[in-house]
Amino acid sequence: MDITTTIEDVANLAGVSIKTVSRVVNMEPNVRPATRERVQDAIRELGYQPNPSARGLASKRSYLVGLFYDDLMAESTYIVNVQRGVLTRCRKEGYELLIHPFNYHQNGINGLAEEITANIIKSRIDGVILTPPLSDLSIAIETLKRLDKPQIRLSPGHHESGSPCVYSDDRIAARLMTEHLIQLGHKRIAFIAGHSGHLAIVHRQTGFIDAMTAAGLNIDNASVSQGSNTFESGVKCAREILSHERAPTAIFASTDEMAAGVMSVAHQLGYSIPGDLSVAGYDNSQIAHQVWPALTTIAQPVNEMAEIATGLLIDQLRGGKKSISQVAMQSELVLRDSTGPAPC
């Protein structure tokens, strides 16, 4: 690359105005396909790379997308997959990604609003993708609105009209998993609920109840145990569940991490999986492939959801799409070796 190459050189070679080159570089609409292609050919031939600072000053944008998430989920497979999806789309569209974890559990709701405000002012982010549970916190949503920052909510528990979001139907997917266990002959099925602040995960418990009720199966206090989305909480819940006189023949955990905790306890207690106990999870995270036997789970297209959410946000930033979009994605039941017929 010749570092002396300028935008004027590109414009001259392509036979267009500097403004047209700028529009192509910034991936703005209203450029004819043939013209766009000619400019892109000139950029490649000259090895031109726009100066990010100059680009931002010229357009009064930073070309930064913010990904905001709960600090407690920083190392989760879910957040890693979200980051991959967002990065993929940002690279295609000429945007950079800035990630920021928020510890609102420690700083409180008011502290969250202050931290979001400070982060926006400091970084000059153009728009924000909110992940759960932030995507369900009205204080986060309203703070971004007050700052006039476009936002897309990923996997929110509420899908209000006029609020852009990308989500999958956790209630339907959890019902399908529970129905699968019932079809295998299981009648005593326990469910490990996730963090109550994650409304999408709460919907998974509702789906479990839907299927159990439709099948006429008993749901009592022993049927549902409260976890917190972590391996450790899965261990704690499993010890409690499997200590009951009439222990279940199947346990459905609302995250794979908790399901892995269940399997660890079951192995320690001498349970055969799935001979004595079937175990199912949710998310199809990396741990689902690492445990033995491999975990039956529900796969959300998290990478794709994140990529689509990023595209919707960038559409807003460019003003190319005025309508507010909500996109529902399909989850998939992934059957592996951790579930089988109920023991006789």
Image (spheres, grey):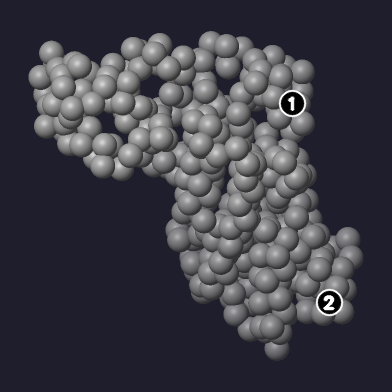
Image position, residue 251 (x, y; %): 69, 66
Image position, residue 267 (x, y; %): 58, 65
* Residue where numbered disc 1 is placed: 142
Tell me the number on the disc at residue 214.
2
Q: Residue at coordinates 47% horizontally, 49% vertically from top-left?
A: 303
Q: Is residue 233 above or below residue 143?
A: below
Displayed quadrant of residue 261: bottom right
Displayed quadrant of residue 185: bottom right
Question: Residue flagged by tag 2: what amino acid is it?
Answer: Ala
Q: Residue at coordinates 89% horizontally, 65% vertically from top-left?
A: 220
Judged from the image, the secondary structure of the residue bearing numbered disc 1 is helix
Image position, residue 264 (x, y; %): 58, 58
Give neighbour class at mark 1: few <14, some 14-19, many 20+ (Cα, 10 Å).
few
Label 1 or label 2, whichever lies nearer to me, is: 1
Image position, residue 187 (x, y; %): 78, 79
Question: Residue flagged by tag 1: what amino acid is it?
Answer: Glu
Judged from the image, the secondary structure of the residue bearing numbered disc 2 is helix
Which of 44/212 is in front? 44
